Image (cartoon, rainbow, N blue to C red):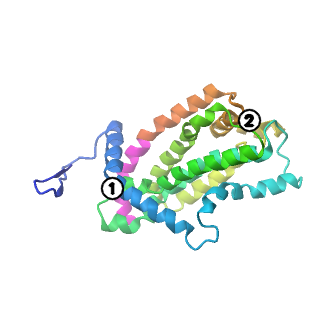
Amino acid sequence: MRYRDKDGVEITVYTPNERQGGLVWGIKQAWQDLWGARHIIWRLFVRDFTAQFKQRLLGYVWALIGPFMGILNFLFLYFTGVLKPGEGEMPYTLYVLLGSIIWSMLPGALGSVSGGLQAQADLLLRTRIPKMALAMTSMTGLIYGMFVNLITILIVFALYGAWPGWPILLYPVLMLPLLLLGVSMGLILAVVGVIAKDLTTIVMHGLSLLMYITPVIYLRSTITNPWISKLIDWNPITYLVDVPRSLLYYGHAENLGLYCLISGVILLLMPPAIRLFYLLEDLVAERL
């Protein structure tokens, strides 16, 4: 518990079993930690944001062209005929751009949160900044990048003489399920991964494989192998990528109900992930 004395000095009082609450306690504690450290999170975001563009020829322009540069290899393979993802109504450039941006929310959030404590190890050992706040610090950059990606999407839409459907107004909401899934997995790996140091690497490699059984760069209809087709159908990430992409381009999508169901399940995973983080967070400083 924290309070300020009559001179305005913040006092922290530790009591036995203060962290033995349930799932609701974990959510409330996470909110208090993040809100209380909001100014520190902002300063760390500004520091990291400015540092990543220093001593670069194009400077802040990289924030806009970064998403497009990430799909150039797929576009090269497509236009040379090496990659045959199938033909659809949506231009392939838009298809792979939307798919890769939506997909990137998962590995981006997972990597940012799981590595947050180790990246801020110096602050973790020298200050009393809540570990939850330090773990979530890098998420500010990911959220910022999400809105920058929206500008890139609109530019590419304009180049094709098209306009996204009305769900473009719900763009942040459509990205939220994969973002929350990445945060949930990242919070667990942030504490468990410090104990088993190769676990994060294994999960990240697993995500690389998962991308290839998710229709990010190819059309679902082009898969003829029945086993691979079933894997794609049973892969929940398929719907978390395909439904938002269809909504953004066409304004409607199939399997919308299934998308909402999967999103609800992901939302239910957040409280246990937060609670596990608080149960194991004290082990992190010992292992760094």
Q: Residue at x 64, y 48 (%)?
A: 101
| Residue 125 versus residue 20 in the image, above or below | below
Q: Residue at x 72, y 47 (%)?
A: 156
Residue 175, percent across and down?
57, 41
Q: Amino acid at mark 2?
A: Lys
Residue 249, visible in the rendered structure: yes
Q: Nearer the viewer, residue 94 or 260?
A: 94
Determine contact: label 2, label 1, CB under 8 Å: no
Q: On the image, numbered disc 2 is attached to which residue?
A: 230
State the mark number for residue 21.
none
Q: Single out the mark in the foreground, 2 or 1.
A: 1
Q: Name the residue tied to disc 1.
A: 130
Disc 2 packing (10 Å; few <14; some 14–19; many ≥20): few
Q: Residue furthest top?
A: 257
Q: Is residue 288 visible?
A: no
Q: Residue 116: image x %, image y %?
A: 45, 59
Depth check, front residue: 227 or 44: 44
Residue projecting furthest to the bottom? 55
Principal SS element in the magenta part? helix
